[in-house]
Amino acid sequence: MHHFHYIKNELYCEEVPVEEIVRTVGTPVYLYSCATLKRHFRAFDSAFDGMKHLTCFSMKSNSNLAILKLFASEGGGVDIVSGGELYRALKAGVEPAKIVFSGVGKQVEALEYALESDILMFNVESPQEILKLDEVAKRTGKKARIAVRVNPDVDPKTHPYISTGLKENKFGIDINDAPKQYTLAAGLKNIDVTGVSCHIGSQLTQSSPFVDALSKMKGLIRILEETGIRIRYLDLGGGLGITYDSEEPPHPNEYAGAIKKELGSADLTLILEPGRVITGNAGILVTRVIYTKTTREKAFFIVDAAMNDLIRPSLYNSYHAVEPVRKSGRGTVTADMVGPICESGDFLAKEREMDAFEPGDLAAIMSAGAYGFTMSSNYNSRPRACEVMVNKDRFYTIRARETFEDLIKGEMIPEFLNV
Ligand code: LLP
């Protein structure tokens, strides 16, 4: 259940008609429901009540300051993967003691910035990174708390582009090689070994791969404790899936229940890095139909949102439901919904039965709150969409639509071309 619903054939976000928002801000626009965001955060976080835990929202799924601020005020932390994400998180008021830093290629500047900010923990992903972090920590006079991100080699049974915990993936350190790396790290003066971490993939629709990964992590913790390395944090990553179409992922309570059962009474703080499950179904992308076109082969709805706004269909062939903002009663047709970009891969829906839209109609691309705006670009020199948050009967622009000036910000014509 989320707060996008129809009243008399008209789509609302909470108590505001979507058409009313579009009249003010135009299209394409990302719309987020504050009530849904809050409810999803609370449902996830409270599922782990009764055990020491920290929910570190994975901000790569949605990094708007207003959204980060909302979760920070709910007591959440964040999972970051770059200096830029750290900057956003701090600007939004996330406590540094609730920030974990993952990623295979953390740059020296980002390591320095995170050390100076005194974040909770670095999830290190290679032996070279451990040594680099020790060196940077020494230089900045800080001690770096780390977890080794291990690759537990479990199959998350999801799209290959978003599987991360298989032997052949670039992420983490093979779980069998981890003890050696822990011994190395424990011997370094500026490193404080505090945790173990993993992240096995995204859009998982079963609990069992998480439980398998956790069981392997527990085995690793036992080995480490035998060698005198005490682990205080267990970071299980993110990855819980959502319903885009007919998927039936476990409810957070079921997922948390399976994890709690496997973890038993271990004296650890559990860290979770959910992204999609919190923001995915809390946002939609609203677009306007520019033209309709019927070729000998197909029917097309050409809309003003494109792959630069939402790349998931093009990149992963992902399904996003398409709903009319006003039900027309004209019946349905099977068509492709495509954008204005000069690529055949520029589609939002393919061979889909949908409302028989006409030029000027508004369509809602559902489940677009995660990996929507954050993966958007300026391809074809298209200004990026604006973002709006709805709270009950009011709406707020939380990111202005980009202008043409924004498109050329920072570009310069060298002197020699001006003669
Ligand atoms: N933690 C780490 C270390 C991650 O790499 C990710 C996602 C997450 C947490 C959050 O995963 P989530 O709970 O959202 O599944 N662009 C793709 C998804 C890529 C996910 C990358 N890592 C998509 O649009 O489906």
Image (cartoon, helix red, strand yellow):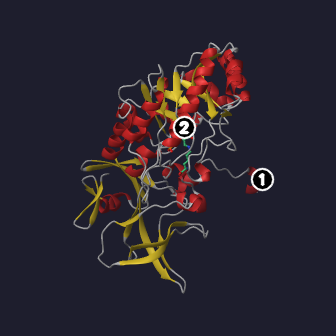
Residue in the picture at 50% in, 28% down: 99
Q: Which residue is mark 1?
A: 416
Residue in the picture at 59% in, 45% down: 155
Classify the position of ligand 1 by quadrant: top left, top right, bottom left or bottom right: top right
Q: Residue furthest bottom?
A: 296
How many circles with numbers are drawn on the protein? 2
Q: Position of residue 200 (x, y in %)?
A: 57, 41
Q: Is residue 50 left or right of residue 212?
A: left
Q: Is residue 129 visible?
A: yes
Residue in the picture at 36% in, 35% down: 47
Q: Position of residue 411 (x, y in %)?
A: 64, 50
Residue type at mark 2? Asp
Q: Is residue 117 left or right of residue 23?
A: right
Q: Quadrant of residue 101?
A: top right
Which one is earlier in the sequence, the residue at label 1 or at label 2? Answer: 2
Q: Is residue 55 visible?
A: no
Decide: few, some or many residues near mark 2? Use Cα within 10 Å; few <14, some 14-19, many ≥20: some
Q: Which residue is mark 2?
A: 212
Residue type at mark 1? Phe
Residue in front for this viewpoint, 294 or 214 = 214
Find numbered disc 1 in the image and state the secondary structure of the residue it sits on.
helix
Q: Is residue 365 above or below residue 400?
A: below
For marks 1 and 2, give the CA distance. Answer: 61 Å
Q: Is residue 160 above or below residue 338?
A: above
Residue in front for this viewpoint, 144 or 153 = 153
Residue in the picture at 47% in, 19% down: 267
Residue in front for this viewpoint, 20 or 265 = 265
Q: Position of residue 209 (x, y in %)?
A: 53, 42
Find numbered disc 2 in the image and state the secondary structure of the residue it sits on.
helix
Q: Is residue 66 left or right of residue 228?
A: left
